[in-house]
Amino acid sequence: MEGVDPTVPPSGTGCADCEASSPKGWWYHLRRCALCGHIGCCDTSPSQHASAHAASTGHPVARSFEPGEEWFWDYKRQVKYDHGPKLTAPTHRPVEQTVPGPADRVPADWADHLHR
C-alpha cells in the first residue's frame, strides 16, 4: 500500500495537535498517519486534525487508532480499506481513554460540536 511505513510508531496516545494547542483540545475518535505515525482527531471531531495533517503533508493514508478497528482511509483516492499492513504497536488508543476524550476537557454540550 502506497503511503504506509509499518515500522513507524504512533506519535502518542491522543491527538498531537489537540495536545499542542492552547487551550488543549478534545477529540471524538483518533486516526494514525500510516506514513509518519502522527495521531490526529477524526473528521467528526471539532478540529479535524487527521485530515488537516494529510492535506498539509501529502501523507495519503491513515488508519483508525480506535480499539477493534483495523481499517485504513486513503485521502488521495477517497477509498476505505478494511485491512492493510500490520503497523508497529500500539495500534490503538488506550482502552481506558474516554470517547470523547480526554474526559477532563470534553464540554457538557460536546455532541453539539461534532461534524456530521
Image (cartoon, rainbow, N blue to C red):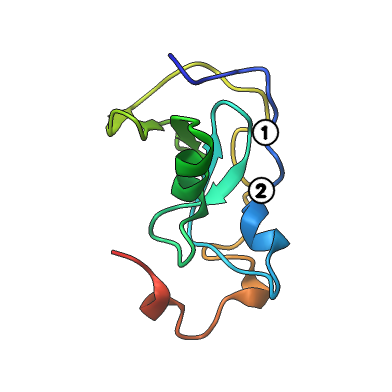
Q: Is residue 77 above or below residue 38?
A: above
* Front residue (pair 91, 8): 8
Identify the residue position indicated by label 1 in the image: 90
* Front residue (pair 4, 28): 4
Disc number for residue 58: none
In space, the residues marked 1 and 2 are separated at their CA atoms by 9 Å
Direction from residue 71 to residue 91 in the image, left or right: right
**Circle 2 crowding by C-alpha within 10 Å: few under 14, some 14–19, many from 20:** few
Residue in the image at 66% along x and 48% along y = 94
User: Is residue 67 visible in this depiction of the protein?
Assistant: no
Identify the residue position indicated by label 2 in the image: 94
User: Is residue 73 visible in this depiction of the protein?
Assistant: yes
Q: Quadrant of the C terminus?
A: bottom left
Q: Are marks 1 and 2 in contact (CB under 8 Å)?
A: yes
Q: Is residue 76 above or below residue 86?
A: below
x, y percentage for residue 38?
62, 40
* Front residue (pair 77, 34): 77
**Mark 1 residue element:** loop
Q: Quadrant of the N terminus?
A: top left
Residue in the image at 68% along x and 66% along y = 21
Direction from residue 62 to residue 15 in the image, left or right: right
Three-letter amino acid code at the position of disc 2: Pro
x, y percentage for residue 115?
34, 66
Three-letter amino acid code at the position of disc 1: Pro
x, y percentage for residue 107?
54, 82
**Mark 2 residue element:** loop
**Circle 1 crowding by C-alpha within 10 Å: few under 14, some 14–19, many from 20:** few
Residue in the image at 66% along x and 23% along y = 88
Determine the image quadrant of residue 71: top left
